[in-house]
Image (spheres, helix red, strand yellow):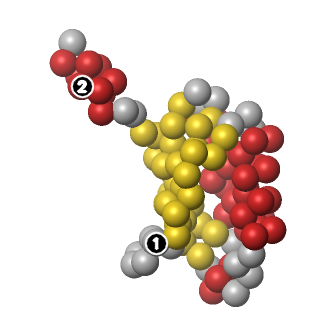
Amino acid sequence: MATFVMFGKYSPEALSQISTERTERFTKMITDLGGSVRAMYATLGNVDLVIVVDLPGVEQAAKASVTASRELGIHFSTHPAIAVKDFDQLVSS
């Protein structure tokens, strides 16, 4: 499994449709792609949401990002994340 951080921005329409049901739809979409949601945060500022997910790979992350944008009206910028201890090992060898 790979970890990805998804930064979300609500469209004006999506902002008016915030609901527990939509959050559950997003979570189900991630699990249907073989992943899991580690954490979800609403934030203030340029980014409205920060979501940390585990997914099998970049293909599933791309699908999650595009599907969420299309079906939920939330634009996501999705980035792979590497634990710092693993990153340190990777770049120091």
Which residue is denoted by mark 1 in the rendering? 43
Where does the image place residue 74, in percent across and percent down from the top left?
64, 69
Say how many tags the image has: 2
- 68 up-or-down from 58: above or below: below
Given residues 56 and 22, the one toward you in this image is 22
Which residue is denoted by mark 2 in the rendering? 88
Secondary structure type for disc 2: helix
Q: Quadrant of the N terminus?
A: top right
Classed neighbour count for the residue bearing mark 2: other residues with Cα under 10 Å, few (<14), some (14–19), many (≥20): few
Given residues 61 and 29, the one toward you in this image is 29
| Dot 1 amino acid type | Thr
Q: Quadrant of the C terminus?
A: top left
Residue drawn at 74 percent across, 75 percent down: 19
| Residue 5 in view (yes/no) | yes
Q: Quadrant of residue 38?
A: top right
Going by the picture, which residue comes out furthest to the left? Answer: 92
Residue drawn at 39 percent across, 33 percent down: 82
- 57 up-or-down from 27: above or below: above
Secondary structure type for disc 1: loop
Q: Quadrant of residue 24?
A: bottom right
User: Which label belongs to residue 30?
Assistant: none
Q: Quadrant of residue 51?
A: bottom right
| Residue 62 in view (yes/no) | no
| Dot 2 amino acid type | Asp
Where does the image place residue 45, in percent across and percent down from the top left?
39, 78
Upstream in the sequence, badge 2 or badge 1?
1
